[in-house]
Image (cartoon, rainbow, N blue to C red):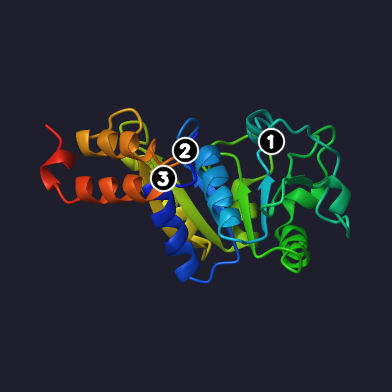
Amino acid sequence: MIPANYTEIDTLYRHIVSRNVRRFVVASVSPGEGATTLAYSLARRASRAGKRVLLIDLNVYKPSLGALLGVERVQWNPNIEDLTDKIVNFGSDGMSVLPAPLDEPLSPAFRETGSLECMLDRLEESYDLIVLDIAPLLLSNARNVPPFTVCRAAGTVLLAVMMRVTRQANLERATALLADEGISILGVAASDRDNPSLGAELEREAMRLNPVFPVGANWLARQIRKVGFLYERP
């Protein structure tokens, strides 16, 4: 789990706010590239800033948000006018989750861009920000909600990339397909989780002080970032 107050998450959140984005998809190219974790962390960061945030799990075949947050899947589809009783609220900080729908059978409405777009339009009346977690873009599965259909409905995508995991050819193919669909790419969030620099590790350790000494933790992290050679790789 990436802490909501982690420096990179805060930077991404501020970029999203600066673009006045109301809804976006967090997508990876292939499985195991951290899209779900990134989606949750950004949603949590926004909720802590006072935003009313809805996190939607549309990775029906292999949902991971449920296990991450301890919520069970429920039966729903985009054509249901009021989804209030399907949404799980987390505490008083404004974050809510719409868990992955049951897939037996999966409603045809999930395969229609118009139905998903109308659903998001309705939900925007109650939420400041909607974050969608979907299946990997290049993973073809007939039982899942088509990822590019969700991307078209949301209109904006943040790509999650895992260093030394994501293949460049696959990333180029995915970005080309998004461009062909006219879908805006909000940015590419690259994670070096499996190969962090010394600077990143020192920042991580510094931020562990945040719960008891937030001012000092952030000051120390800023000083570390000023030392460029700590982020160089052999």
Figure check: 114 above or below 26: below
Query: What amino acid is labelled 1 in the image?
Result: Ala
**Circle 3 sits in a helix, a strand or a loop, which is it?**
loop
Q: Residue at x 42, y 63 (%)?
A: 15
Residue that label 2 marks: 2
- Residue 137 locus on image (x, y percent): 53, 43
Q: In this rendering, would 96 be left or right of 158?
A: right
Residue that label 1 marks: 142
Q: Nearer the viewer, residue 128 or 176?
A: 128
Quarter of the figure with the C terminus: top left
Q: Nearer the viewer, residue 82 or 117?
A: 82
Query: Do labels 2 and 1 touch, CB within 8 Å?
Result: no
Q: Tell me the distance, in whole angstroms, between the alpha carbons under discs 2 and 1.
A: 31 Å
- Residue 75 locus on image (x, y percent): 86, 39
**Circle 1 sits in a helix, a strand or a loop, which is it?**
loop
Query: What amino acid is labelled 3 in the image?
Result: Tyr
Q: Badge 1 local density, few (<14 within 10 Å), some, or many (20+)?
A: few
**Circle 2 sits in a helix, a strand or a loop, which is it?**
loop
Query: What amino acid is labelled 2 in the image?
Result: Ile
Q: Tell me the distance, in whole angstroms, between the alpha carbons under discs 3 and 1.
A: 36 Å
Q: Badge 2 local density, few (<14 within 10 Å), some, or many (20+)?
A: few
Figure check: 129 above or below 142: below
Decide which of tag 2 and tag 1 comes sooner along the chain. Answer: 2
Residue that label 3 marks: 6
Query: Do labels 3 and 2 touch, CB within 8 Å?
Result: yes
Q: Residue at x 80, y 47 (%)?
A: 87
